[in-house]
Image: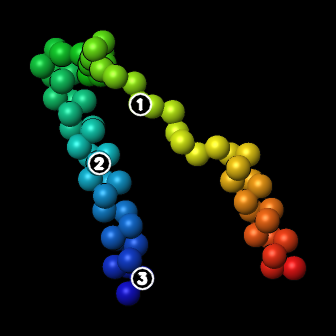
Amino acid sequence: TMAGVLGQLLAAPVVATLRMLGRYAWRKMMDLPPFPDPDPGAVPHPPSPVKWPDVKAWLRRVQRKKK
């Protein structure tokens, strides 16, 4: 049914939001910083390998083939 599909789509975001709010409230009650500073030794994420001009060129080629 539609309610079941909607429930499945909303379950993960609702649980994640409740978890985040619960963690925030707990840390505030325990007098801890609600959002701890990131680890200074953490390695940043590498840049994305996707090159948008290449994707745009590929999409143009695909659209030309369909015509």
Q: How busy is the neighbourhood of tag 3: few (under 14 within 10 Å), some, or many (20 plus)?
A: few
Residue at (70% x, 49% y) in the render: 54
- Quadrant into which the C terminus falls: bottom right
Alpha carbon distance from label 1 to label 2:
23 Å
Alpha carbon distance from label 3 to label 2:
22 Å
Alpha carbon distance from label 3 to label 1:
38 Å
Of labels 3 and 2, earlier in sequence is 3
Of labels 1 and 2, earlier in sequence is 2
Viewer-proximal residue among 32 and 50? 50
Residue at (23% x, 43% y) in the render: 19
Residue assigned mark 1: 45
46 vs 60, left or right, is left
- Quadrant into which the N terminus falls: bottom left
Residue assigned mark 2: 16
Image quarter for residue 51?
top right
Q: Please determine whether, in this image, residue 23 is positioned above or below residue 65.
A: above
36 vs 60, left or right, is left
Q: What residue type is labelled 2?
A: Ala
Discs 3/2, front: 2
Q: How busy is the neighbourhood of tag 2: few (under 14 within 10 Å), some, or many (20 plus)?
A: few
Q: What residue type is labelled 3?
A: Met
Viewer-proximal residue among 61 and 39? 61
